[in-house]
Image (cartoon, helix red, strand yellow):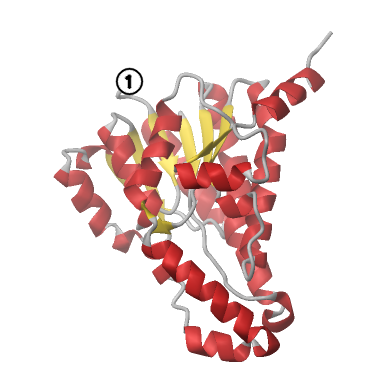
Amino acid sequence: MAASKTVLITGTSTGIGLAAAVGAARAGWDVVATMRDPGKAGRLLAEAGAVGAAGRIHVERLDVTDAASIASAVARATAAHDGLDAVVNNAGAGVVGTIEVGGMEPVRAAMEVNYFGVVEVTRATMPHLRASKGRLVTVTSVGGVVGQPFNEAYCAAKFAVEGFMEALASVAAAVGVRVSVVEPGAVASEFVASQRIDIPALVAEAGPYGPALQSYIDRALQSFGNAQSAEEAAATVVEVLEAEDPPFRVQTSEWARGFTASKLADVDGSAVQAMMAQWLETR
């Protein structure tokens, strides 16, 4: 990988985003590592320094829910690095609950971060990716393929992202941009802890859904107790960045592949993409 290639990654203060930024820098990419609060970049820079890659990390402020923040960060990054060769949409937020109890606010908030934020970053960076014949990688979730209980808002947003990217992929390919989605399962990272869920209060507020919610939470906690590490999941992101011919859809673990395969016979997305390419063929 040429040292001059530049990737912009969102949500790099913790978890998969942090590990992907370090992994990409270690692989030779110049990394524009974005986060809402650059004051939280200490761990990222320390981990990059530990592997001799701190010089390739360039921290920028970017809030995916703020179009002006996105435009400003992209403008600074492209000016400093003479364009972009890749973008990784990673920033996201979870929400646990059900619509009857939680109402619309959590749904709208989840869509703003997990869906509209991805769309806005994509819109802002596509001209640069088109110019470089680059690639667009989006970290979704197995929850973007299989709907899971008490994750209605989160799964809806991730389903929307998967549909958006699947539809965009063939269009982007027509102008030389490769689009991929990366689907982790349970990942042991601050993503879960950052939700600061008061479990007893959440169960109590769930009313008639309380027993089912408690069962779900018990299973989820067990699942995250045996979760893949953020570094393992991020390694898949870096592999997609580095791949000569990246797939549209890739999972980060054998468990994630098996889980998504329960719904998707076309696990790597190649059949759908071949069909869409035919739709766009000029005669």
Q: Position of residue 265 (x, y in %)?
A: 68, 36
Q: Position of residue 205 (x, y in %)?
A: 61, 90
Residue plotted at (48% across, 47% down): 255
- The C terminus - image quarter: top right
Secondary element at tag 1: loop
Looking at the rendering, in which quadrant would you find the N terminus?
A: top left
* Figure quadrant of residue 242: top left
- Side of 1 where 158 appears, left or right: right
Residue at the (74%, 80%) spot, across then down: 100
Whole-percent x and y of residue 153?
A: 66, 66
Mark 1 Cα-neighbour bin, 10 Å: few <14, some 14–19, many ≥20: few
Depicted 229 relative to depicted 102: above or below: above
Is 228 located above or below residue 174 in the figure? below
Q: Amino acid at mark 1?
A: Ala
Q: Which residue is mark 1?
A: 2
The reply, left or right, for residue 194 in relation to residue 57 is: right
In front: 209, or 70? 209
Counting from the top left corner in percent of width and height, residue 92 is at 51, 58
* In the foreground, 33 or 138: 138
Which residue sits furthest top?
283
Q: Quadrant of residue 114?
A: bottom right
- Above/below status of 216 relative to 91: below
Q: Residue furthest right?
A: 283
Q: How many marks?
A: 1
**In the drawing, does residue 144 fall left or right of residue 103?**
left
Q: For residue 34, say whether it is visible.
A: yes
The residue depicted at 39 percent of the width and 51 percent of the height is 16
- Front-most of 82 and 84? 84
Residue 183 is at least partly visible in this image: no
Q: Residue at x 67, y 75 (%)?
A: 98
